[in-house]
Image: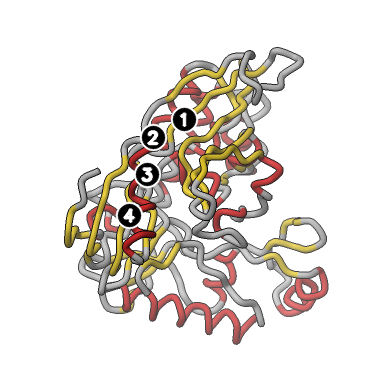
Amino acid sequence: MKIQQNVPLAPLTTFKVGGDARLFVRASTENEVIEASCFARDSSIPMFVLGGGSNILVSDRGFDGLVVQIGIKGVRDVTRGDHRVNDETGDFTFVEAGAGEDWDLFVDNVLERGLAGVECLSGIPGLVGGTPVQNVGAYGQDVSETIVSVRCFDRRTGSVIEISNADCRFEYRKSIFNSNMRDRFIVLNVLFRLRRGGAPNVSYRDLAGSFGTRIPTLKEVRDAVLQVRRSKSMVIDETDQNSRSAGSFFKNPVVSIAVFERIKSDHANVPGFEAGDGVKIPAAWLIEKAGFNKGFTAGEAGISANHTLAIINRGHARADEIVVLMRRIQEAVADKFGIDLLPEPVFVGF
């Protein structure tokens, strides 16, 4: 394990914002992850686990502790002899991927093999290890639909364990990894259950409209998703300042039916989607109605010209500028609708 000092974190994030890590380690094996965790514990210093840097905002002062970047690689099929495989029909392939694998390259790889289940998650930046943490989802598909189990290092007990899908307690953009057990587990690899020759998911309205009545191929769905994401600057492009973001900055709030009806009485065109016992309202709609349109600027921070949900670094933004804009948006939405918008990114070093 090689420990570096004063490593800039901004280049390791999609926001391109933030200060340095006092100490930094890139862990390429499970043993290095464990060694780094033990070092932080024995040295009584805080530790932050960094993946692809696509869903974080690092403070201007950086992180005064140890940052461990996960670099565990490897993708392999898991055979029926493995006790984790339970497929009586034989229609599925079980694929295990290291937490340090690039997520979109993984998606592309399994789709090329004719394995369905993650096609709508094409183009999402980050690493495999980050997907169960946020239960990433897009265009009618969530990663939790295909996850069998997550192999983790338990920092509390010092052991490596397998956590089943059920025990991950997946909800909308939520799991035990970012809620009640935040900072306890470090994801090492993820086991997926993908359908061989399965039909793609085209339940999302914009995708369904692209293909009419015919059933598209997995590759066609991937291409359509990438096209939609590029139009919203949601695919990382070094030449596009609108992609210097953490993706969707706010979660779509789920409100009670009573709250939805109250808002609908003043705004007949409010969009809403059934979500359990409540209604999910697009955060982008709330933000626009609160007075923040695409292309809004606030110093070096701003809102993407292509996607209202993305707060962006316009070139030389400080983390504090992004936080100020976040709070302005939250306060405006709360004042107009009585709804608290919750941010999606992890805040590091604040």
Which amino acid type is shown beneath numbered disc 2? Glu
Which amino acid type is shown beneath numbered disc 1? Ala
Query: Which mark's residue is nearer the viewer, 4 or 1?
Result: 4
> Residue at (57%, 79%) from the top-left corner?
333
Which residue is under mark 4? 39
Residue 198: give x, y in percent of width and height.
Answer: 64, 20
Of 251 and 68, which appears nearest the observer?
68
- Quarter assignment of residue 192: top right
Instruction: Give the mark nearest the N terminus, 3 or 2.
Output: 3
Q: Are marks 4 and 3 in contact (CB under 8 Å)?
A: no
Instruction: Give the mark nearest the N terminus, 4 or 3.
Output: 3
Q: Are marks 2 and 1 in contact (CB under 8 Å)?
A: yes
Which residue is under mark 1? 97
Give the vertical position of 215 relative to 171 (above or below). above
Distance between mark 2 and mark 1 Cα atoms = 7 Å
Which residue is under mark 2? 101
Residue 179: give x, y in percent of width and height.
Answer: 59, 61
User: Residue furthest toward the bottom?
Assistant: 335
